[in-house]
Image (cartoon, coloured by chain):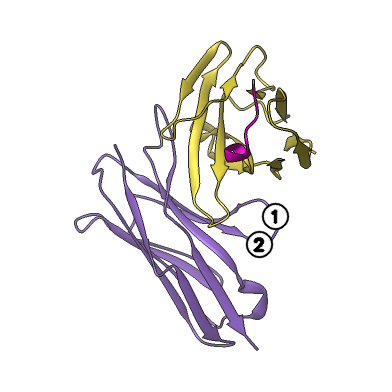
């Protein structure tokens, strides 16, 4: 079934570690996004991509980086995790021209200890 | 850039009552307004959307209204049921070009039996 997949679902990691959160979609969407969701619910855009080799920073300053080497894959990397990075990270994709709004992945809940 | 305000932050109703959530946006170029429902521990799911060429859209017990002049849009849920309990997000964007959704801060709806 065409969908958007995130792994891992949960991650607990020590301060200073490098981590990569995976996001893959099988819908053929050009546009992909990473949102950070507070415990208080708000969704903040941290990165987005319009297609292969295109990445932009979002509205919320983030110490993470992203890459888009393949259409279906949009990983997010934290070079050195800190407790302030503890949050839920949601990946999404869209293709408005074909009538598809955002589809979200199930998220990665990251805890940095 | 776009700014979306959402009210109320929390809404408690009795089963069978109606619920209304309101959002305002700032960018007159926005023309796509989706609503997402996020149940506890799950991903946000699109429940209804509206484009600026229409003023109202209905889908069974849910409806969305849009007032472009006043730059506000609302979600109406009639005959609420306990399974409607969730966090609801409004959002706004252009539906061409960048297509970056800007989300409201969310409304936690609790429907009591």
Task: Tell me the magenta residue range.
Answer: A80-85
Q: Which residue is mark 1?
A: B42
**Residue A56 in picture, x, y percent from top left:** 46, 21
Up-down relation of residue B21 to residue B31 (above or below) = below
Residue A2 visible in this rendered orientation of the protein = no
In the picture, measured across the screen, residue B53 lies left or right of residue B86, that is left
Supply the letter of whichever chain is yellow: A
Q: Which residue is mark 2?
A: B39
**Callout 2: SS:** loop
**Residue A102 in picture, x, y percent from top left:** 56, 41
Q: Residue at x 51, y 14 (%)?
A: A54
Which image quadrant is residue A53 in? top right
Q: Quadrant of the C terminus of chain B?
A: bottom right
* Residue B83 is covered by the magenta coloring: no
Look at chain B in the picture and name its colour: purple
Q: Are the residues flagged by discs 2 and 1 in contact, CB closer than 8 Å?
A: yes
Q: Quadrant of the N terminus of chain B?
A: top left
Labels 2, 1: one chain = yes
In the picture, measured across the screen, residue A47 lies left or right of residue A106, that is left
Which image quadrant is residue A75 in? top right
In the picture, measured across the screen, residue B53 lies left or right of residue A52, that is left
Up-down relation of residue B78 to residue A1 (above or below) = below
**Residue B99 in picture, x, y percent from top left:** 43, 33
Q: Chain of mark 1?
A: B
Mark 2 nearby-residue class (10 Å; few <14, some 14–19, many ≥20): some
Up-down relation of residue A94 to residue B71 (above or below) = above
Q: Residue at x 19, y 56 (%)?
A: B69
Mark 1 nearby-residue class (10 Å; few <14, some 14–19, many ≥20): few
């Amino acid at each position: 079934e065409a969908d958007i997949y995130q792994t891992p679902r949960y991650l607990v990691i020590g301060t200073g570690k490098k981590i990569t959160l995976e996001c893959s979609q099988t819908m053929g969407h050009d546009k992909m996004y990473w949102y950070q969701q507070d415990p208080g619910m708000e969704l903040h855009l941290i990165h987005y991509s319009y297609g292969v080799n295109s990445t932009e920073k979002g509205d919320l300053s983030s110490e993470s980086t992203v890459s888009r080497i393949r259409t279906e894959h949009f990983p997010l990397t934290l070079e050195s995790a800190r407790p302030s990075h503890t949050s839920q990270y949601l990946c999404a994709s869209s293709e408005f021209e074909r009538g598809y709004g955002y589809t979200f992945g199930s998220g990665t809940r990251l805890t940095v200890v | 850039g776009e700014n979306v305000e959402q009210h109320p932050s929390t809404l408690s109703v009795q089963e069978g009552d109606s619920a209304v959530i309101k959002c305002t946006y700032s960018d007159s170029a926005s023309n796509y307004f989706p609503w997402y429902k996020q149940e506890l521990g799950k991903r946000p799911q699109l429940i209804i959307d509206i484009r600026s060429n229409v003023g109202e859209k209905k889908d069974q017990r849910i409806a969305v209204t849009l007032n472009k002049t006043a730059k506000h849009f609302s979600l109406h849920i009639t005959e609420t049921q306990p399974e409607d309990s969730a966090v609801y997000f409004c959002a706004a964007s252009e539906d061409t070009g960048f297509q970056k959704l800007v989300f409201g801060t969310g409304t936690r709806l609790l429907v009591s039996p």
